[in-house]
Image (cartoon, grey):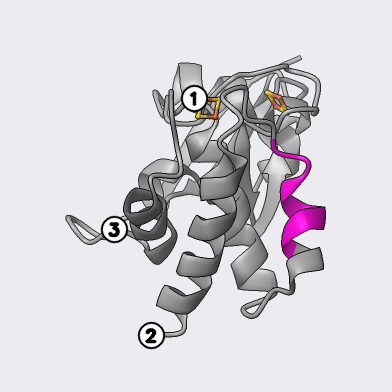
Amino acid sequence: MDSTITFTVNGQSRTVTTDPQRPLLDVLREDLKLTGTKYGCGEGQCRACTVLLNGKSVASCVTPVRDADKQTVLTIEGLAQGSQLHPVQAAFLEEGAYQCGYCTPGMIMGVVGLLSEKPKPTEDDIKTRMQRHLCRCCGYPNLTKAIHRATALQQGK
Ligand code: FES
Ligand code: FES
């Protein structure tokens, strides 16, 4: 049976009436037309679909939309402030941390989540967190540079 779900997405209150078991990813992409969040494996294994739920990164393909009811979701579309890129977006651009770009929104949201939890991540923190994000183009070296750059930018360096 459908339920009415009301949640805040990228600072705006949104309401959908849908099957509460539907993946959050499907609701974001199909109902709210926020297609920046990507579908990769659909099984919680690649993290292409990463968004922040109450500030924590989650795989939206395996997160039922009912978990977002009355909660706050941030997607890649909500990061930049007008033409001002978020420091993590700027770092990815500066370090060329993408190739085809399919994994990039999920990677960026994963890094934003990591830095909000740990503003000064260690190498181990970065490795542990980011090893769950898969990049079929194997852009890992530049990705690592971008995370360090993002950490520095966030600290105003
Ligand atoms: S699409 Fe969600 S983890 Fe792969
Ligand atoms: S840049 Fe192509 S999948 Fe990561």
Give the amino acid type for the residue marked by disc 3 in the picture: Leu
Residue 85 image label? 3
What residue does disc 1 label? 102
Instruction: Verify CB contact (< 8 Å) between mark 1 and mark 3.
Output: no
Q: Residue 89: horizontal and vertical position, in percent?
A: 38, 54
Q: Residue 36: horizontal and vertical position, in percent?
A: 42, 30
Q: Horizontally, is 95 left or right of 110 in the view?
A: left
Residue 67 image label? none
Q: Residue 132: horizontal and vertical position, in percent?
A: 78, 40
Give the amino acid type for the residue marked by disc 1 in the picture: Tyr
- The answer to whether the residue bearing label 1 lies less than 8 angstroms from the nearest atom of ligand 2 is yes
Name the element at disc 1: loop
Q: Residues within 10 Å of mark 1 (few under 14, many from 20)?
A: some
Disc 2 from disc 3: Cα separation: 14 Å
User: Which region shows up in magenta?
Assistant: 126-133
Name of the residue lying farthest toward the bottom: 156
Residue at position x 71%, y 44% in the image: 58
Instruction: Tell me the quadrant of the picture where the N terminus can be found.
Output: top right
Q: Is residue 19 above or below residue 98?
A: above
Q: Is residue 13 above or below residue 157?
A: above
Q: Which tag, 2 or 3, sits closer to the chain's start?
A: 3
What residue does disc 2 label? 156
Query: Can residue 73 be seen here?
Result: no
Q: Which tag, 1 or 2, sits closer to the chain's start?
A: 1
Give the amino acid type for the residue marked by disc 2 in the picture: Gly
Nearer-the-camera pick, 37 or 149: 149
